[in-house]
Amino acid sequence: MHGLAASAILLEKEHLREAVRIRPARRSDLQTILQLVNDEAEKTSGLAVRRVSCEEVESWVDSDLSYVAEFNNKIVGHLGISLWEKLGYGELRSFVVTEQYRNIGIGSFLLSQVIDYAIDNLCIDVIIAFRSRDITIGDGIFRSLGFTEVLFSKLPCQVQREKEKSINKRVYAKRLETILWRSKGKHNNGR
């Protein structure tokens, strides 16, 4: 039996919250995140995720926009967010789950928890993710959590300018739930 078969049984939906811990990344996680993301970039020739620098991961961690998934006290997933606060947009960056821990719900749980955090604490209305047309790994996660594929040309001009290298990629977008008020989170800036 594959080593994770028992884990898959353990991670039935009702047990996922107890088995996996989602938390903000810490500086002490930098090397683990860097290796996790760059190993995945190497495996997929940069199509699923791109290589990142230590400085880039450091900036996500320092701005509280980097999250990890832990299973058995081991980091098995990472998701970073970049913001265009004035536009009300956030971009998912380096969304990755270690290959041996895929297809057991960790990625969906990580993404859903970060979306919940964004709704409550970040001043954004739309979350986007750029996906290579050649890679379909993870597309189901986006669809199951309410993301839809949108045209690059429908993004705000500033996003298009900054992401012009992504013009040939698929773009998934999710409009966050409309809420009457937002808590005064770190990234709210009084909006």
Image (cartoon, rainbow, N blue to C red):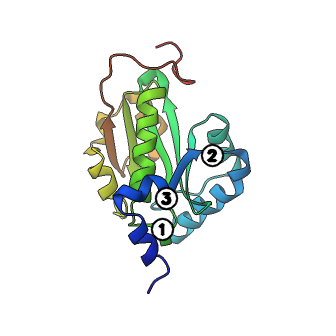
Going from N to C along the chain, the mark reached first, 2 or 3, is 3
Image coords of residue 97 (percent x, y): 49, 61
Residue under the image location 46 percent in, 83 percent down: 2
Nearer the observer, 1 or 168: 1
- Contact, CB < 8 Å: mark 2 with mark 3? no
Residue under the image location 36 percent in, 52 percent down: 169
Q: Quadrant of residue 150?
A: top left
Please tell me whether mark 3 sits on a helix, a strand or a loop.
helix
- Distance (Cα) linking label 2 and label 3: 18 Å
Please tell me whether mark 2 sits on a helix, a strand or a loop.
loop
Task: Give the labeled residue for mark 3.
Answer: 19
Going from N to C along the chain, the mark reached first, 2 or 1, is 2
Image coords of residue 160 (percent x, y): 41, 36
Residue 44 appears in view: no
Please tell me whether mark 1 sits on a helix, a strand or a loop.
helix
Q: Nearer the viewer, mark 1 or mark 3?
A: 3
Counting other residues with Cα less than 10 Å from the Cα at mark 1, is it few (<14), some (14-19), or many (20 or more)? Answer: some
* Left or right relative to 177: residue 83: right
Q: Amino acid at mark 1?
A: Tyr
Task: Give the labeled residue for mark 1.
Answer: 101
* Left or right relative to 78: residue 155: left
Task: Give the labeled residue for mark 2.
Answer: 25
- Distance (Cα) linking label 1 and label 3: 12 Å
Residue under the image location 47 percent in, 76 percent down: 4
Q: Nearer the viewer, mark 2 or mark 3?
A: 3
* Left or right relative to 26: residue 99: left
Going from N to C along the chain, the mark reached first, 1 or 3, is 3
Q: Amino acid at mark 3?
A: Ala
